[in-house]
Image (spheres, rainbow, N blue to C red):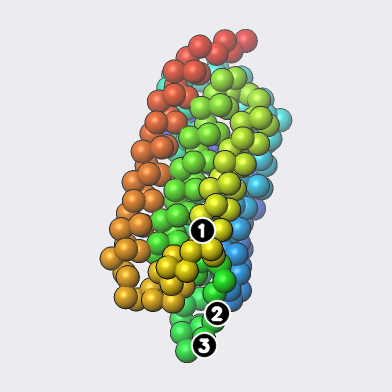
Amino acid sequence: MYNLVKKDLKLGIQPFFFVFPLLLGLLMLIPSWVYFLVPLYFCWLTIPNMFSNFKTQNDLMFTAMMPVTKKDMVKARISVIVILEIMHIGWAAIFGLIHDLLYANINVGYYFFAPTMGFWGLCMAMMAIFNIAFIPMYYKTAYKYGGALAVAVIAAMLFAGIVQWLGIRISSWSELFNVNVADHWVFHGTLLIAGIAIFAAFTLIAYGIAVKRFLKVEIL
């Protein structure tokens, strides 16, 4: 499985997409921006390019000729997706901390969610929804990714849009995320832990469903 992950990282993904999360993280330095857009670029750009590259290289047939099981093929591909997701959110969180230091003495009026621990928990939940929508649908064929990607992107965007809209419309939510953050660190910490737990659970569920579906796929 390790060699499959190594293959995907070295041969299947263009080097730019390992730098891309860092570049996107710089967007976190924009004061009072829509920070949900930063991890969403993973869904909009990284995944489409990554799976287009795999399809162009006929990676499925190539990997099927290797002495590996279908279960390991799924596990390796999902591991690569998770690695890239963590890179995107990790760099964004780092620049979110830099953002807090830069604007510590400036009264930034946040209309959208500020980059808090709770916000990153919501981002992890958004990625979880993307994974559980995209991965099982993709492994119906392990080749066609367009329909699965469209459903997953819409699901992730709906989650982000609804949560952000509630944060704007409900004043108590706005205060929790944007005004009295230091007074509610337990809430934000709990939300972060919950987001990570949801991400892990949904990804494992997606993996289980994907394996069952991929075992039924005939690779010619």
The quarter of the picture where the C terminus appears is top right
Q: Give x and y (percent) for residue 85.
A: 50, 49
Q: Residues within 10 Å of mark 1 (few under 14, many from 20)?
A: some
Q: Give x and y (percent) for residue 120.
A: 44, 59
24 left or right of 71 in image: right
Q: Amino acid at mark 1?
A: Leu
Quarter occupied by residue 36: bottom right
Mark 2, secondary structure of its residue:
loop
Q: Earlier in the sequence, mark 2 or mark 1?
A: 2
Residue, x 37% and y 50% (percent of image)? 196
Q: Which residue is mark 1?
A: 166
**Outermost right residue:** 56
Q: Is residue 29 above or below residue 91?
A: below
Residue, x 52% and y 86% (percent of image)? 107
Residue, x 47% and y 69% (percent of image)? 171
Which mark, by number, is residue 106?
A: 3
Mark 2 or 3: the one toward you: 2
Q: Amino acid at mark 3?
A: Ile
- Report if residue 26 is visible in the image: no
Residue, x 46% and y 84% (percent of image)? 104
Q: Which residue is mark 2?
A: 109
49 or 8, which is in the foreground? 49
- Report if residue 165 is visible in the image: yes
